[in-house]
Amino acid sequence: MNNLAKYHGVIPAFYACYDDDGNISPKRVRALTRYLIDAGVKGTYVCGSSGECIYQSKEERKTVLENVVAEANGRLTIIAHVACNNTADSMELAAHAESLGVDAIASIPPIYFHLPEYGIAQYWNDISSAAPLTDFIIYNIPQLAGVSLTPSLFREMRKNPRVIGVKNSSMPVQDIQMFKAEGGNNCIVFNGPDEQFISGRIIGAEGAIGGTYGVMPQLFLKADEYLRNNNLVMAREIQYDINQIIYTMCACKGNMYAVIKEILKRNGLNIGSVRLPLTPLTSDDIPKVDECEHLIKDATTKYC
């Protein structure tokens, strides 16, 4: 039986941290790690979508993970996303992650070419074989990867004893229930879409990994508290306010992560902007960023 309790709760996706020239900044990586520790979250998901991994080299991703692990020093559950566009690079990152002592590695399916299920299973199992002592989490995000995790593929992957569950970022909440039913008790499913944090948790997700948690961790921690105390009225209310913040961030011309990073910078945590081709903020976005910042502050005052 795996120790799954360390994955329960609120796990923010780690943001890409750049210096003023757009290079990976170890100093800012460590600052963001300290910020998450101080916020009181359970852990962090490193080098995933929010970490802009698809626009970073292997060596950059290694640098990020090394600094997160060193700064966290056992104070956070660390899940390292290691998928690359080919198996060899993914295996290299998996072995590197295991050498650092992360709690788990994770991977999306291969992208661009639509592979058969046995090809996807081979890809994931090859990655897992490079980190044979480390838990493996499947990252299901069909709207970006172009491939959906099916019950039959999940069943096949569960033959690998290192596969402990799914980070489910598909939009139907029903998928969480489906993976929970398929995986059984010795399996964890993470809710992915931040807009359904409450509904995903209610239907069976024990943990949650999200891209907006880092800019408003206290709101998600309070939502988690409401759930654990069976206060569904307040859980629903705070989810509505969270969703309004997310909708407002997504209404900008700049990428949502550019909005998030600007809000963090205004509050004393400068981790740079986003890397092209992600779109940076424009001058037209500033009123919306102001609105987002005020919405977060108002909601934090209201609930926390």
Image: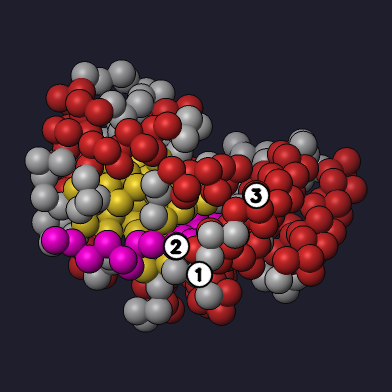
Q: Is 224 rendered above or below residue 244?
A: below
- Residue bearing mark 1: 41
Residue 261 in the image, given as x and y percentages of width and height: 68, 57
Residue under the image location 43 percent in, 67 percent down: 43
Which of disc 1 and disc 3 is earlier in sequence?
Answer: 1
The earlier-in-sequence mark between 2 and 1 is 2
Magenta stretch in the rendered image: 1-21
User: Residue 232 at what x, y percent from top left?
Assistant: 60, 53
Say which of 208 and 22 sits in front: 208
Residue 76, quarter of picture: bottom left
What amino acid type should be assigned to the residue bearing mark 2?
A: Gly
Looking at the rendering, in which quadrant would you find the N terminus? bottom left
Q: Earlier in the sequence, mark 2 or mark 3?
A: 2
Tell me the kind of residue under disc 1: Val
Which of the image's four quarters has the C terminus? bottom right
Residue count near mark 1 (Cα–Cα under 10 Å), binned few <14, some 14–19, many ≥20 = many
Task: Name the residue tied to disc 3.
Answer: 236
Q: Position of residue 70 (x, y in %)?
A: 38, 77
Is residue 195 rendered to the left or right of residue 207?
A: right
